[in-house]
């Protein structure tokens, strides 16, 4: 009841205020002696005042809007100018990307030429090895012939010595017959002189053959040393590239090449045998071991992911600890995030076999490729996958389109490299690839 009384008093005060502001008025009109008047009620006065206030507000708004229109037009012109500048900047970026693409294509062509040159060098080395082995076998045959001739010469000398002794005995027995003795002595002297001449001739022939064999061995030794040095230089370059990735060569080569990567024992200097060709044989054995290691490293380099998965990109997030882009908490990031144009092409970074092609939880649409030797690559947040599980892919083969699927805040590519199931920093592989393509 108290609240109703207070409401009644408030209505009464409002009514008295309106009576003071808008009392009932009369408008008198005088026409030819007649006087008339028009009553203006309180409600009519309130309506007229409200209309006047609305007209005044509308006029004020129109005036202000008209005065601000020029400023709005100027702001629009500035926005158009900024848009033109942004478009020109975009054209410059496109030109820069085209130049980078041309440079990358040129580097790939140079790398292809380098690989072809290495294949040709390998073919030449194989041919030289076959020729050297043939010459070595021929030298061994010559050496055997020399040894056989030496044995025959010794046998002849023994026979001649026996003949001389027999002739001497006959000389003592035939002293009575001087003519027979002189004839026999003359024959013995001739036989002895012939044997001595044959021995000297065979000795000269053996010496000449030994000189020729040494000369041939020296020439072949120089060629083999040069080939060995070139092979060792190539091996050192490949090992330096593998070192950039942070992985150990022994782990990458695996147990099948353990005798190349795991060695040891006390040092005992090896001395070549004294037979002709002993040093050449040792050098050939060393060259064969170097070529075997070089071939293993070439096979390893062919399956390592050293290229980038996109032609044009911006590195958005590195490998390691970072702030999570969704909840802003500290977390580990086991890959690289490449920002790029939506639906741009994604390429395989090394040849291999697709082991997964489809949706995988937070990765969204994901591709996993096995490159052999314990190396795998992953490509996440894809918009479209153009390969299937079990398919073989080549180096720089198109596998997907860049997208924004899964747990992602925008269009980008999540790229991972795993070695024996453990993630490694892909940036080290990309830097190593830049070194290879530069050479």
Image (tube, rainbow, N blue to C red):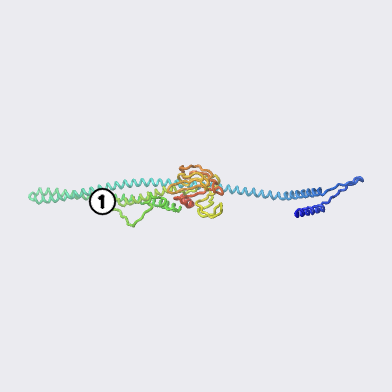
To which residue does mark 1 refer?
207
In the visual, does 169 lie left or right of 430?
left
Coordinates of residue 54 in the picture (x, y in percent): 76, 49
Q: Which residue is nearer to you in this view: 283 or 362?
A: 362
On the question of residue 54 being in view, the answer is yes
* Count of numbered circles on the image: 1
Q: Residue at x 25, y 48 (%)?
A: 144
Horizontal arrangement in the rendering, residue 169 relative to residue 366 (left or right): left
Decide which of 272, 246 is in the foreground and name it: 246
Seen as rendered, the residue at the extreme front is 1
Which residue in the rendered view is the most extreme toward the right?
A: 33
Residue 295 rendering spot, x and y as whole percentages: 39, 48
Is 129 in front, or is 34?
34
Q: Is residue 175 left or right of residue 269?
A: left
The spot of residue 316 in percent (x, y) is 54, 51
Residue 116 place in picture, x, y as percent: 42, 45
Q: Sort mark 1 into few (<14), some (14-19) or many (20+) by Cα contacts within 10 Å.
A: few
| Mark 1 secondary-structure assignment | helix
Q: Quadrant of the N terminus?
A: bottom right
Observer able to see residue 114? no
Q: 215 and 325: which one is in front?
A: 325
């Amino acid at each position: 009841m108290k609240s109703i009384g207070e409401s009644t008093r408030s209505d009464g005060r409002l009514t008295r205020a309106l009576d003071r502001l808008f009392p009932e008025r009369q408008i008198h009109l005088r026409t030819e002696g007649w006087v008339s008047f028009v009553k203006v009620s309180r409600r009519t006065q309130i309506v007229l005042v409200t209309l006047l206030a609305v007209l005044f507000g509308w006029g004020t708004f129109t005036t202000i809007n008209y005065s601000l229109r020029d400023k709005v037009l100027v702001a629009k012109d500035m926005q158009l100018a900024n848009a033109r500048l942004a478009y020109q900047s975009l054209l410059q970026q496109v030109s820069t990307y085209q130049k980078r693409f041309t440079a990358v294509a040129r580097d790939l062509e140079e790398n292809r030429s380098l690989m072809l040159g290495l294949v040709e060098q390998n073919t030449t080395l194989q041919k030289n090895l076959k020729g050297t082995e043939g010459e070595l076998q021929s030298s061994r045959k010559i050496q055997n012939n020399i040894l056989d001739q030496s044995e025959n010469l010794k046998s002849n000398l023994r026979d001649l010595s026996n003949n001389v002794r027999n002739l001497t005995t006959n000389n003592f027995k035939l002293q009575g017959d001087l003519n027979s003795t002189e004839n026999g002595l003359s024959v013995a002297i001739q036989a002895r002189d012939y044997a001595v001449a044959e021995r000297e001739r065979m000795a000269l022939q053996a010496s000449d053959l030994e000189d020729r064999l040494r000369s041939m061995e020296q020439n072949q030794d120089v060629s083999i040393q040069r080939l060995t040095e070139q092979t060792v230089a190539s091996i050192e370059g490949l090992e330096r590239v593998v070192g950039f990735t942070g992985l150990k060569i022994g782990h990458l080569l695996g147990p099948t090449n353990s005798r190349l990567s795991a060695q040891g024992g006390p040092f005992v200097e090896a001395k070549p045998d004294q037979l002709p060709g002993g040093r050449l044989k040792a050098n050939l054995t060393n060259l064969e071991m170097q070529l075997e290691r070089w071939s293993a490293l070439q096979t390893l380099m062919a399956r390592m992911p050293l290229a980038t998965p996109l032609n044009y990109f911006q590195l958005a997030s590195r490998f390691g600890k970072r702030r999570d882009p969704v909840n802003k908490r500290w977390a580990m990031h086991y890959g690289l995030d490449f920002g790029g144009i939506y639906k741009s092409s994604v390429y395989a970074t090394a040849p291999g076999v697709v082991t997964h092609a489809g949706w995988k939880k937070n990765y969204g649409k994901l591709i996993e490729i096995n490159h052999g030797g314990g190396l795998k690559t992953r490509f996440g947040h894809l918009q479209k996958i153009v390969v299937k599980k079990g398919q073989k892919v080549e180096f720089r083969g198109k596998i997907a389109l860049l997208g924004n699927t899964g747990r992602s805040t925008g269009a980008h590519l999540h790229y991972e490299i795993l070695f024996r199931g453990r993630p490694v920093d892909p940036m080290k592989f990309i830097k190593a690839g830049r070194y290879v393509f530069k050479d």
